[in-house]
Image (cartoon, rainbow, N blue to C red):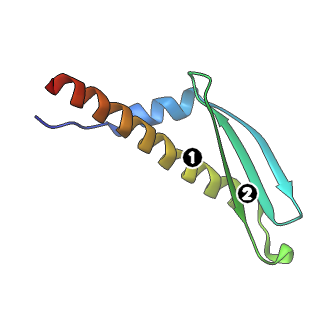
Amino acid sequence: MTFKIPKSHIDEIIEQSAFEDFKTKNGNCTIVAMTLPNGYTLVESSGCIDPDEYDHELGISLCKEALRRKVWQMEGYLGMQKFHEMQY
């Protein structure tokens, strides 16, 4: 028996999530909060050494990608837990 989490499942979670707090700190750090459909909140940040090279939109993009990876990890854990419980 194999266990897979379809990309469409992750996409659905991301689409139903609320992104907030696209903040810049110290002129070189982006902070993004994402509240999942179940109410759980994840936070990610990305930064740049030189404030003159800082790109807020790129920071948001990097944070959203990191948040997507966290959702994959969480869903993977949940799926493996269910799979494990089915074995016993």
Q: Is residue 55 above or below residue 69?
A: below
For the question of whether residue 35 can be seen, the reply is yes
Instruction: Say which mark, if any, is on residue 58.
Output: none
For the question of whether residue 8 can be seen, the reply is no
- Report whether 64 appears left or right of 71: right
Q: Earlier in the sequence, mark 1 or mark 2?
A: 2
Q: Is residue 78 above or below residue 25?
A: above
Name the residue tied to disc 1: 67
Percent coordinates x, y for residue 57 in the rendering = 73, 57
- Report whether 7 appears left or right of 15: left
Name the residue tied to disc 2: 57
- Report whether 51 appears left or right of 88: right
Q: Nearer the viewer, residue 73 or 9?
A: 73
Q: What's the CA distance linking mark 1 and mark 2?
A: 15 Å
Characterize the local packing of mark 1: few (<14), some (14-19) or many (20 or more) Cα atoms within 10 angstroms.
many
Q: Is residue 47 above or below residue 35?
A: below
Percent coordinates x, y for residue 64 in the rendering = 61, 49
* Element class at badge 1: helix
Placement of the N terminus among the 4 image quadrants:
top left
Can you tell which quarter of the image residue 61 is in?
bottom right
